[in-house]
Image (cartoon, rainbow, N blue to C red):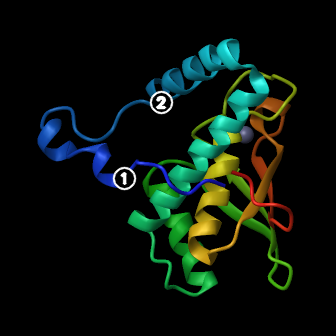
Amino acid sequence: MKNTYDFSWEDLGDLQMGRPHLGAQMPVVVYRLLEYTFKDVLSQELGLEKTAAIFVKAGHLAGREFCKNLLDCSLALDPFIAALQKTLVTMKMGILRIESADLANLQFTLTLSEDLDCSGLPLYGETVCDYDEGFIAGIFHQYTGLEFQVKEVDCWATGDRTCRFLVEKNTGQVAG
Ligand SMILES: [Zn+2]
């Protein structure tokens, strides 16, 4: 995964100064409006596959920056995961659970409930959380220095009540 983008956390601006009356919170519907209109327009311009790949890359970049700026990568795995769970709740992004962890092979199954991106969506018959796949891979990358493959296997949009992600160390060629 390409690691050299121009984005930095400072690009998000000073919300206290910039939004003294409206503050840092806004309804989830506004976030989803941005996400799903972007997804529709990009899909029509570039195709669904390319769009999904872009969402994975953007999620990866976001996950790395999220990890760098809001988490402590020097923590051992258990306290790191606990801090990640807490931060995802504080930021109202979702409720993370570790279903299984194979530390020897760096393989994990995670669930994210009440997911910001998809929980409550209509049934599409396919998973939609490409951004989350990248986001989780980006966090694991930032924490370990290794590249990870993340695949969403269950999603609200496939009729499930939680998103379920298979996470494993990428053994193949690192994607650009
Ligand atoms: Zn999902």
Question: Looking at the rendering, which quadrant does residue 76 occupy?
Answer: bottom right
Determine whether label 2 and label 1 are within 8 Å by CB. no
Instruction: Please say if 92 is above or below 159.
Output: below
Q: Residue at x 56, y 65 (%)?
A: 85
Q: Residue at x 36, y 52 (%)?
A: 8
* Badge 1 density bin: few <14, some 14–19, many ≥20, Cα 10 Å: few
Which residue in the protein does label 1 denote? Answer: 8
Q: Is residue 114 visible?
A: no
Q: Residue at x 21, y 32 (%)?
A: 22
Instruction: Please say if 112 is above or below 79.
Output: above
Instruction: Please say if 135 is above or below 36.
Output: below
Amino acid carrying label 1: it is Ser
Q: Is mark 1 within 8 Å of ligand 1?
A: no
Question: Looking at the rendering, which quadrant does residue 121 occupy?
Answer: top right
Q: Is residue 150 visible?
A: yes
Is 164 situated left or right of 21 in this image?
right
Of residues 44 and 124, which is closer to you in this image?
Answer: 44
Which element is circle 2 on?
helix
Is 9 situated left or right of 115 in this image?
left
Q: Which mark is residue 31?
A: 2
N-terminal label among 2 and 1 = 1
